[in-house]
Image: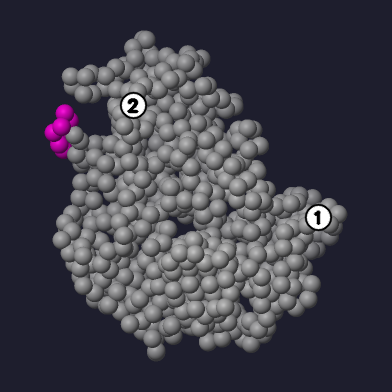
Amino acid sequence: MFTRPKRLIFLSLLVLISIVMTSCQAPPPTPEVILETVVVTEIVQGTPVQIVVTPTPGEEEGAQIPDTGIIPADAMVPCLPLPEPPAAAAPQNSVAQVPAPQTAAAAASAKTQAAKVFGKLSPAPRQQGGVTYNVGVFEDVTTTNFWAANGPDNTVWNSYMLPPRLTMYELSDVTFTFVPVVAAVDVPDPLRQEGDEWVTEVPMRQGITWSDGEPFTAEDVAFTANAALELGLISGNWVSWYDGAFLDRVEAVDDYTVRYVYHTKPGLARHEYGTLQAPILAEHYWAPIVDAALAPVRELGENPSEEDLAAARQAAQDELFAHVPDGEPLAGAFIFSGWEPGAFFDNDANPNYFAAGTTMRIYENGAVEQGNETFGGEPEGEVIVESEIGPHVDAVVYTIYGTQDAAILALRNGEVDFMLNSLGLQRGLADQIRGDPNLTVVENPTNGFRYLSFNNRRRPMNDCAFRQAVAVLIDKEFVTNTILQGAAFPLYTYVPEGNTAWYTGDVPKLGQGMTRKQRLEYAIAILEQAGYTFEGDVKPTFDDTGNSVVPGGRLIMPDGTPVPNLTLIAPSAGYDPLRSTFAIWIETWLNEFGIPVTAELSGFNVLVPRIFVEQDFDMYILGWSLGIFPDYLRDFFAEDQAVVDGNNAGGYVNPEFEELANNILTCSTFEECKEYSDAIQVLLSTENPYVVLFDTGIIEAYRSASIEFPYTEQLSGLQYTHQEGGKLQSQVKIR
């Protein structure tokens, strides 16, 4: 689940912040831990003081605390009622204040905070004949095989560049209104029960053709769904698109009517937001390839053992994913035309795209007009988007650059029109181009968060009281406002406020608005209530005169065992200075409290297998980019995801959560799903399997002298609707 509509992308923001570092270069892939020093500014009694913060060395570097070793947890320790919190100071604003999109001329006086660090420019973009939309990217695609690109090779870069596939329905730009694409009705008939099954039929538009001239029919829809089910695809996006826990089969009633059959009644998450928005591939091209791949599965006959079936499916998937498409028919706005690995990726406009020439209007109330059709209710209010569907270019050319500074130089030189990055521009680089009259810089809120997770398979991370105390001790406002100087904003909710339909602020927000002294006292109260003590009965105290914590003894668990030496792993400053800064301060706060923690900062490619495959950690910091529908609230913490490669790497298991969270997959109305979503968020904010830390807005720049977008205000930025390979690309106009 790493691409839209339900995209769980690990965030890797490369932010150029002068108080953290002069320039950020991606570190080489190395398994060695990097203990980095960060220079920060701390306010001490009203006076800014520069200090040097270094992660605590491990035992091999001379740490004096004896290591008691990893202590496995037998079970989760449930939460106790929280003590009465201290009267906190007024909470600081934790919501990103995102300004309206601003032109470069309007922001010409913005202060530059970082030096110009333009690197060596990558090869100039390949210019095709005709009009091209030239886009700069920072990573290459890993495959042109759509099955693999949304499974084991699921990356945002594949989503940006692979040509689009048609779906029965989709969510509109900007307002995320449910609208038809291939379907011929604005909403499907409700599911009805027939015996033990739940079914509905959806009529299709006629006259759509594949790029080779073959008609686009219900056989294509049924083939794609049934192939995914028979292959047992569960990685990447496939489990949310065609989930075998609900979907039994899809049938072609006739050439232009699709029948969906579920063995278990699904909710919005797996029907409207899942199967009905799933991609459709060409049956006449892929069927022979899929049939050959499935041979070992079909040779098993009926009722094979689970072990034999799993092995055969794995072999089938491996063979299918290894196929290199040649001449694959497509039906979207663009068609794949060429790829030179490490240099460029090209898509040509589809001259037979069925929606070309359609006028689209999106209204203030979310209603959408497409041609003579209206979806999402009667239009009310102003038209916030008006666009003619293209493509308006002959090709989209993606040129691969090694660094943001190289791509910025290409943007300023007119070699590319837009830069694609799921996390946007480093603020320092954005400041450098605000005065260029040919460029426009826009800022938008994002739908994601950076977080601290615990390994609940180990003590004391399995104890709710411990997790709550850690949450209280982390001063998010101090790091985001004072240390990072507003480059990030603190978060307390599992659904970001930018996702207005599903957001609720009515959840416990441990530590919000508290002073350091109040945090210290409240964390002690939480832990003492749960039976924790301190070595020598010496608690940490707060020195009002020195405005600092006076450390006490080591924290002792309820059974009398000292808390063992713990590690907190996080991206290095060279990869993400924001998360590395948080890790260093968390290490400082926990150690002065009596919790021995070492921050280990290393490359992102080292962290991911350690967390999700080896599951060898005590605590880690990473991030997610989120889909609109909040079914991720279940997927991140469900027991069936607490496996190797699962989303629940922390091994959080709670029967109360399971019972509540599974409802998010079966609820069938917005009101019902919102009620469950809110309740899940309250439970998670109490249990704290994650401590949600912060997020940033997204900054993007485009060459407004050469291109025109139909809109610039979009949750998660323009990059969000560049995904799926052609949605916003098909609306871009060249000046």
**Which residue is situated farthest in the bottom direction here?**
129
Q: Is residue 346 above or below residue 628?
A: below
* Residue 698 placement: quadrant: bottom left
Seen at 42% across and 39% down, the residue is 492
Mark 1 / mark 2, whichever is N-terminal: 2
179 within the magenta span: no
Residue 210 vertical placement versus 262 (above, below): below
Q: Nearer the viewer, residue 231 or 475?
A: 475
User: Callout 1: helix, strand or loop?
Assistant: strand
Residue 588 place in picture, x, y as percent: 30, 31
In the displayed structure image, the side of residue 210 where residue 520 appears, left or right: left
For the magenta stretch, what is the residue range? Answer: 44-50
Tell whether 414 sits left or right of 452: left
Which residue is under mark 1?
193
Q: Residue at x 65, y 61 (%)?
A: 275
- Residue at 47% across, 51% down: 500
Q: Amino acid at mark 2?
A: Ala
Name the chief secondary structure element in magenta.
strand
Q: Examine the rendered structure and indicate whether residue 575 appears above or below residue 583.
A: below
Which residue corresponds to mark 2? Answer: 88
Contact (Cβ within 8 Å) of mark 1 with mark 2: no
Q: Residues within 10 Å of mark 1 (few under 14, many from 20)?
A: some
State the residue in front, 137 or 600. 137
- Mark 1–mark 2 distance (CA, rounded to whole Å): 54 Å
